[in-house]
Image (cartoon, grey):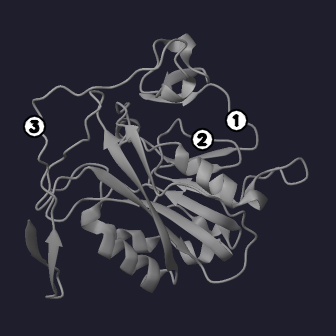
Amino acid sequence: MQVRIQDRHGHTFFVSRKVNAVDPSMPTYVRIPPPPIPRSWVKHIRPLDAEAESTPRSIISGMLIPKSEPQWSRRIETPSTLEFDFTVFDRTLQCIYMDPPLLLPNEDAKPGYFDIAKLCAIPVHKMLVPGAFLFTWCEKELLPDMCEIAEQEWGLKYVENFCWVRHLTNNHIARLPSDYFCRSKVTLLIFRREGDLEMRHQRSPDSVFDFVKPRLPGDLNDRKPDFAYTVIETLLPRALCTPDLPNPDRLLQLWMPADSHRKHWTTIVQKSLETLAM
């Protein structure tokens, strides 16, 4: 089956769509290994209780945050990430990892979300050292705009991408509404600034199947798989903190959940709408 689509520049494309011939009403068989079930089969979706959490959390201002900061980490709160003074990171960062709450095309305005054009206000190119990376999550409707901003506004080059295929708790792939095809995955675009930087090459998959986790108060986007951190921290060994370099000024994450601050990272947390309204 072929579908004809046209982009905003008038170019026409024909996309082949695979038709699923499997009857969805038929049972799905899953072979479960004998006890003990290996840890690799377990997916963390929701804690059973507070004691089950590896990092104790408490509720502050309606958001869950760790009671203690991880070693070699920094957490900065700001009313607006777009208006934050990023000059403190002048040419120090080896990687920026972000998940901006973007409005989809023709989507009505929502509190906390903004148009992708406003990303130009962040001076990404002025914060990265030569050879550094930008990892940014993006829905498929915004992929051309994100690439255009990264290349034309920030002077970065596209190098690779990584996909998260959304799984529901019934082990089915999510099927969110979209104009042409259902939205079942989110893309992590990887851009790089020109220059040399020590890297550790790795053999990593270009996609991961993981469950959609329940959103907590203050979350604007779905919580993304932690596998992205593994990719970044393996790729950039010199970005990690050490006793000689304890300042976490080489890895920066933006628009991540308020409780996602992590060892080796600086996390800029945008205050929740409830907090700002107080």
The quarter of the picture where residue 271 lies is: top left
Point out the tag, 1 or 3, that comes first from the N-terminus: 3
Q: Give the residue type that dot 3 points to.
A: Asp
Q: Where is the N terminus found, in terms of image quarters?
A: bottom left
Question: Does residue 199 appear left or right of residue 143 in this picture?
Answer: right
Classify mark 2: helix, strand or loop. loop
Eyeballing the image, is 29 above or below 224? Answer: above
Please state the horizontal and vertical placement of residue 149, each as a whole percent of the image: 40, 78
Classify mark 1: helix, strand or loop. loop
Question: In the rendered picture of this protein, how many numbered marks are placed on residues?
Answer: 3
Question: Does residue 50 appear left or right of residue 111 in this picture?
Answer: right
Please state the horizontal and vertical placement of residue 161, each as a whole percent of the image: 45, 65
Mark 1 Cα within 10 Å, few/some/many (few <14, many 20+)? some
Disc 1 + disc 3, Cβ < 8 Å: no
Q: Give the residue type that dot 1 points to.
A: Pro
Eyeballing the image, is 100 above or below 145? Answer: above
Residue 115 shows in this picture: no
Eyeballing the image, is 33 above or below 212? Answer: above
C-alpha separation, residue under disc 1 versus residue under disc 2: 8 Å
**Farthest residue, direction right:** 244
Instruction: Please tell me which residue lies in front, 103 or 185.
Output: 185
Q: Which residue is mark 1?
A: 70
Q: Which residue is mark 3?
A: 23
Point out the tag, 3 or 2, that comes first from the N-terminus: 3
Point out the tag, 1 or 2, that comes first from the N-terminus: 1
Mark 3 Cα within 10 Å, few/some/many (few <14, many 20+)? few
Q: Which residue is mark 2?
A: 261
